[in-house]
């Protein structure tokens, strides 16, 4: 699968969420921060984007911590995103 197609599929997963807050946050992150991620961080973000909102939201808001250090880095970056 070509990179452009992978990115389009990821964008779809990030912006077609059950929670509007997650649509906005993940979409903004994808536009602003994702291009600057290292390959391991990008892989961790894809895993996070594949999670259901009810599983992901506690990680994003900090009420639950990730045991994976790279995933934790990405979650910290997600928490710093300010949605326009």
Image: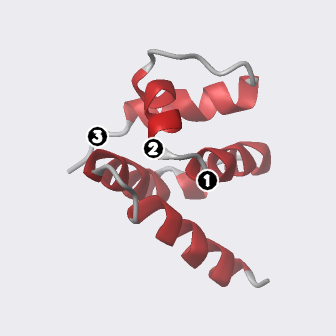
- Judge the density around disc 1: few (<14), some (14-19), many (≥20) Cα neighbours within 10 Å: few
Q: How is the image coloured?
A: secondary structure
Q: Residue 50 has which mark?
A: 1
Q: Are marks 1 and 2 in contact (CB under 8 Å)?
A: no
Classify mark 2: helix, strand or loop: helix
Classify mark 1: helix, strand or loop: loop
Classify mark 3: helix, strand or loop: loop
- Judge the density around disc 2: few (<14), some (14-19), many (≥20) Cα neighbours within 10 Å: some
Residue located at (46% from left, 25% from top): 58
Which circle, 1 or 3, is nearer the viewer? Answer: 1
The image quadrant that residue 61 belongs to is top left
Can you give x and y, in whole percent of width and height, for residue 65 in the image?
Answer: 58, 16
Residue located at (57% from left, 51% from top): 49
Can you give x and y, in whole percent of width and height, for residue 5 in the image?
Answer: 65, 83
Which circle, 3 or 2, is nearer the viewer? Answer: 2
> What whole-number distance in Å separates the C-alpha atoms at marks 1 and 2?
9 Å
Residue located at (56% from left, 77% from top): 8
> What whole-number distance in Å separates the C-alpha atoms at marks 1 and 3?
21 Å
Q: Name above or below for residue 4 compared with residue 63.
A: below
Can you give x and y, in whole percent of width and height, for residue 38 in the image?
Answer: 72, 47
Residue at the spot of label 3:
82
The one nearer the camera, 40 or 35, is 40
Which residue is at the far left? 84
In the image: residue 42, left or right of residue 58 = right
Residue at the spot of label 2:
53
In the image: residue 27, left or right of residue 7 = left
């Amino acid at each position: 699968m070509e990179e452009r197609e992978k990115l389009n599929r990821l964008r779809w997963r990030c912006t077609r969420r059950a929670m509007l807050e997650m649509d906005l946050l993940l979409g903004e992150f994808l536009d602003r921060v994702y291009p600057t991620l290292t390959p391991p961080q990008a892989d961790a973000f894809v895993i996070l984007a594949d999670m259901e909102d009810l599983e992901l939201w506690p990680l994003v808001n900090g009420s639950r911590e990730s045991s994976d250090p790279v995933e934790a880095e990405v979650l910290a970056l997600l928490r710093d995103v300010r949605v326009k």
